[in-house]
């Protein structure tokens, strides 16, 4: 069997289908790159990553195969000998690309490509006296797999001849998402989401995409959404990755990545991030339909796709029914000027209001027009492929494989502008990465992670102890003694070294934290109780409680000599905080 891919996104679709032959020693899987695409640069490296065996295009054209499986009708497919199976490489056939094929046809359902094999013409002679080159053999399309009956009707209208081998199978990629839904908590744990709301941004490729029209939106959202309430992820279409390259894309997104945004991988990881997400902000890319089909959670649109989006397509229906971040009229595609330059509070409010305006069931209803036979596509396709091969399938099933856990963000902010509002109930805290808006109540920085300049500017410095097991062994003989800071020794040394610091703290992931305040003769121990709701337990990052203690002590001009309690408010959750004078044992605890 030959898996022929013209682009990375087409290859990934083929990889979702390849397991239909898992465990069958009669099947050999080979890969080839179909030349001619601007987006083929990542195909060979992706095949190498999975350990696939690759055939050069010239060798693939010289051989015959029992089955040729592709996920795009474009390219010189007629040169590949063997029964062809064509799969879609997106959801819903929503786009018409003005620079390719027929201007009014959906990409993937374009007669200019689907019928080309039936109208192959002799290759032009190399010289006037040379005879015409033989006509390339027409590629026998044995199966054109579609995901929904509406797609079959559209194909029949656009290219009736192409429907002879078309069948509604469903979408194997959606099968993988549905099979992976029980792993949602595992994916969120892998992303270190905690009790935050994970907002996923989806950007397709081309001039109408979110990244092209609103290139600063990921950075602004990553920096301005409160860090302890929201986590941001970005899903970028593989075509855009191929055009830019991994390095260039990372540099373009550097401000957002530095603020902690997750950049989802192009293969599999994008889908596991969709499952982990609490809400979606999308352009007209079809990933939103997978999200809507898999789970009924809020979706917000950004733009209407310009001239690319086909009226009446599933994605067009979805975008017209969901709230918009920015203008609500169908012809507008840009964020209004007042929103583009809005301060953090206004942008956050705009997004949260749009998410609240989403009506449950809207996305799921739109996705029904893109996917039939949900959860059964892979088994249906397996039956069809074994019929084409003339083989009986093995006696065991090959269910859709769950998606692997995604990779967490590789960067995290180490300094925050902390907005602190002291209320009768306690202290409301919102931390945002430094330098993204109006300065807050104070700057809090992690010692040993933030730069020296930020460390010297911070009003609150905190340190997270590094366990010995995480410290690499150095060559040579061991030190004769360990020289460790005591908790109070380090905090008082830090206040001495950094005159601008008002509070230094040892932040431990569990157990009490030790605080030392400039001008106070004693240190304090801080403990935070978890928040409980609906049978679940939410734990607060102790660094947040340290900032709350700083704001509370400053506002009350307090020097507690007895246990003191107040509440730390973060978003919709409240955490009980207790502040006690530290004992000698607590101040001498090593770090």
Image: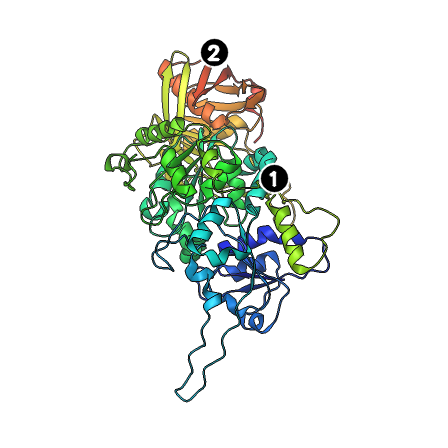
Q: What residue is rendered at 56% in x and 31% in y?
A: 591
N-terminal-most mark, 1 or 2: 1
Q: What residue is rendered at 50% in x and 16% in y?
A: 576
Q: State whether residue 199 appears in this view.
A: no
Q: Secondary structure at mark 2?
A: loop
Q: Residues within 10 Å of mark 1 (few under 14, many from 20)?
A: some
Q: Position of residue 273 (x, y in %)?
A: 51, 40
Query: What colour-coding does the image apply?
Result: rainbow
List the residue tagged with mark 2. Answer: 561
Left-right relation of 317 to 52: left
Q: Position of residue 531 (x, y in %)?
A: 53, 19
Q: Residues within 10 Å of mark 2 (few under 14, many from 20)?
A: few
Q: Secondary structure at mark 1?
A: helix
Which quarter of the picture shows residue 518? top left
Which quarter of the picture shows residue 570? top left
Up-down: is 544 above or below 457?
above
Left-right relation of 222 to 33: left
Q: What residue is rendered at 41% in x and 89% in y?
A: 129
Q: Nearer the viewer, mark 1 or mark 2?
A: 1
Q: What residue is rendered at 59% in x and 21% in y?
A: 585
User: Which numbered marker is on residue 179?
Assistant: 1
Which quarter of the picture shows residue 403? top right
Q: State whether residue 354 appears in this view.
A: yes
């Amino acid at each position: 069997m030959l898996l022929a891919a013209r682009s990375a996104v087409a290859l990934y679709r083929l990889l979702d289908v390849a397991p239909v032959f898992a465990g069958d020693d009669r099947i050999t899987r080979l890969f080839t790159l179909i030349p001619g695409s601007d987006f083929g640069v990542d195909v060979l490296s992706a095949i190498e990553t999975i350990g696939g065996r690759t055939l050069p295009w010239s060798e693939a054209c010289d051989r015959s195969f029992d089955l040729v499986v592709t996920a795009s009708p474009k390219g010189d497919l007629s040169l590949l000998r063997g029964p062809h199976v064509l799969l879609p490489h997106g959801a819903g056939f929503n786009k018409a690309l003005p620079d390719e094929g027929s201007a009014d046809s959906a990409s993937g359902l374009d007669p200019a490509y689907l019928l080309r094999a039936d109208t192959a013409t002799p290759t032009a002679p190399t010289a006037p006296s040379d005879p015409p080159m033989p006509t390339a053999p027409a590629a026998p399309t044995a199966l054109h797999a579609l995901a929904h009956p509406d797609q079959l009707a559209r194909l029949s209208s656009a290219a009736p001849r192409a429907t002879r081998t078309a069948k509604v199978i469903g979408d194997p990629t959606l099968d993988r998402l549905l099979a992976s839904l029980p792993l949602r908590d595992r994916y969120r744990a892998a992303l270190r989401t905690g009790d935050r709301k994970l907002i996923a941004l989806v950007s397709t490729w081309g001039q109408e995409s979110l990244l092209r029209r609103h290139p600063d939106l990921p950075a602004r959202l990553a920096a301005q959404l409160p860090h302890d309430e929201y986590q941001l992820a970005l899903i970028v279409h593989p075509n855009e990755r191929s055009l830019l390259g991994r390095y260039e894309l990372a540099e373009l997104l550097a401000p957002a990545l530095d603020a902690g945004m997750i950049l989802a991988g192009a293969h599999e990881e994008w889908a596991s991030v969709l499952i982990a997400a609490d809400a979606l902000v999308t352009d007209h890319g079809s990933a939103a339909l997978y999200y809507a089909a898999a789970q009924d959670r809020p979706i917000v649109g950004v733009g209407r796709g310009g001239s690319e989006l086909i009226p009446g397509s599933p994605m067009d229906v979805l975008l017209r029914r969901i709230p918009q971040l920015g203008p609500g009229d169908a012809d507008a595609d840009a964020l209004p000027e007042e929103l583009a330059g809005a301060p953090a509070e206004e942008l956050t409010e705009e997004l949260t209001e749009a998410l609240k305006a989403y009506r449950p069931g809207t996305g799921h209803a739109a996705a029904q027009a893109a996917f039939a036979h949900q959860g059964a596509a892979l088994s249906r396709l397996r039956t069809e492929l074994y019929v084409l091969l003339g083989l009986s399938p093995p006696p065991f099933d090959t269910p859709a494989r769950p998606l692997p856990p995604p990779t967490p963000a590789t960067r995290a902010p180490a300094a925050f502008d902390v907005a602190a509002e002291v209320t009768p109930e306690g202290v409301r805290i919102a931390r945002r990465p430094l330098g993204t808006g109006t300065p807050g109540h104070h700057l809090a920085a992690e010692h040993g992670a933030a730069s020296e300049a930020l460390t010297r500017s911070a009003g609150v410095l905190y340190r997270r102890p590094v366990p010995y097991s995480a410290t690499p062994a150095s060559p040579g003989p061991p030190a004769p003694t360990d020289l460790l800071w005591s908790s109070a020794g380090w905090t008082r040394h830090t206040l001495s070294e950094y005159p601008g610091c008002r509070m230094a703290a040892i932040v431990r992931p569990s157990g009490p934290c030790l605080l030392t305040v400039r001008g106070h003769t004693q240190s304090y121990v801080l403990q935070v109780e978890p928040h409980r709701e609906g049978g679940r337990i939410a734990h607060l990052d102790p660094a947040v409680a340290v900032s709350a203690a700083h704001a509370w002590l400053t506002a009350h001009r307090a020097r507690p000599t007895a246990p003191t309690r107040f509440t730390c408010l973060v978003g919709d959750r409240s955490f009980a905080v207790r502040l006690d004078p530290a004992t000698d044992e607590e101040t001498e605890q090593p770090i």
